[in-house]
């Protein structure tokens, strides 16, 4: 392939510069490579006005990838310089907005977690939950079962009695005993 099909690189950056002629599909890669080599550093330098160097390079790479993917749809009469710089600018601004949102989210999470862990109630609630579970585990099985069906599964006394094959009075007595035991063991915390 000869270089006759390429727009001279010095003209690419003039205000009137346009994309190289796109009618010949054989020269797309050469034209793109020439444009890439000529513009990469300038675009990175421009992007560093907004972003750190690594982010700037990534934005320029994304821009060039977009250009490659959309090469055949770009209006050849438009300025390549304006197009590339506008894309880099927009991507840099989007990157800044995204980082700002992430920063706010991280700050909010940090704030919420610090409040949670600084609160004595957090440790008290954890300790109380452990004591509650220990007290339940120490209950005799019939009491624990009735308590679970009533409080966790939220069954009525009648439903519990039917399931266990006992009377509702037995269910009532077991729940009353369970509550007395739990009040006795956890009384100072309730």
Image: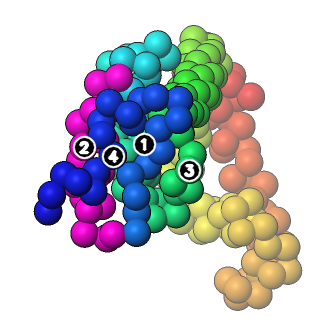
Q: Which residues are magenta?
A: 24-42
Q: Which residue position is annotated with label 4? A: 7
Q: Nearer the viewer, residue 28 or 162?
A: 28
Q: Nearer the viewer, mark 3 or mark 1?
A: 3
Q: Mark 3 and mark 1: span between their CA atoms? A: 19 Å
Q: Which residue position is annotated with label 3? A: 77
**Relative height, residue 24 to residue 165 (above, below):** above
Q: Nearer the viewer, residue 95 or 14?
A: 14
Q: Which residue position is annotated with label 2? A: 34
Whether residue 21 sits left or right of residue 122 in the image: it is left
The residue located at (48%, 44%) in the rendering is 18
Q: Mark 2 and mark 4: span between their CA atoms? A: 9 Å
Whether residue 60 sits left or right of residue 94 in the image: it is left
Q: Nearer the viewer, mark 2 or mark 1?
A: 2
- Helix, strand or loop at label 4? It is loop
Q: Position of residue 124 (x, y in %)?
A: 59, 22
- Helix, strand or loop at label 3? It is loop
Q: Which residue position is annotated with label 1? A: 63
**Relative height, residue 108 to residue 157 (above, below):** above
Of the numbered discs 3 and 4, the one sitting upstream in the chain is 4
**Relative height, residue 107 to residue 5 (above, below):** above
Q: Mark 3 and mark 4: span between their CA atoms? A: 13 Å
The residue located at (78%, 55%) in the rendering is 176
The residue located at (27%, 57%) in the rendering is 5
Q: Mark 1 and mark 4: span between their CA atoms? A: 20 Å
Quarter of the image where the C terminus is located: top right
Q: Are marks 2 and 1 in contact (CB under 8 Å)?
A: no
Q: Position of residue 6 (x, y in %)?
A: 28, 51
């Amino acid at each position: 392939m000869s270089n006759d099909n390429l727009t001279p690189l010095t003209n690419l950056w003039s205000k009137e510069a346009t994309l190289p002629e796109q009618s010949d599909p054989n020269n797309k890669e050469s034209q793109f490579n020439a444009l890439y080599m000529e513009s990469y550093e300038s675009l990175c330098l421009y992007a560093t006005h907004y972003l750190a160097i690594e982010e700037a390079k990534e934005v320029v790479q994304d821009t060039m990838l977009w250009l490659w993917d959309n090469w055949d749809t770009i209006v050849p009469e438009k300025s390549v310089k304006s197009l590339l710089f506008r894309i880099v600018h927009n991507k840099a601004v989007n990157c800044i907005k995204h980082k700002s949102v992430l920063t706010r989210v991280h700050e909010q999470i940090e704030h919420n977690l610090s409040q949670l862990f600084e609160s004595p109630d957090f440790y008290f609630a954890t300790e109380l939950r452990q004591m509650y579970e220990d007290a339940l585990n120490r209950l005799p099985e019939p009491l624990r079962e009735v308590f679970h069906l009533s409080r966790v599964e939220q069954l009525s006394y009648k439903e519990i009695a039917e399931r266990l094959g006992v009377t509702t009075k037995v269910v009532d007595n077991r729940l009353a005993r369970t509550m007395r035991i739990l009040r006795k063991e956890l009384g100072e915390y309730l």
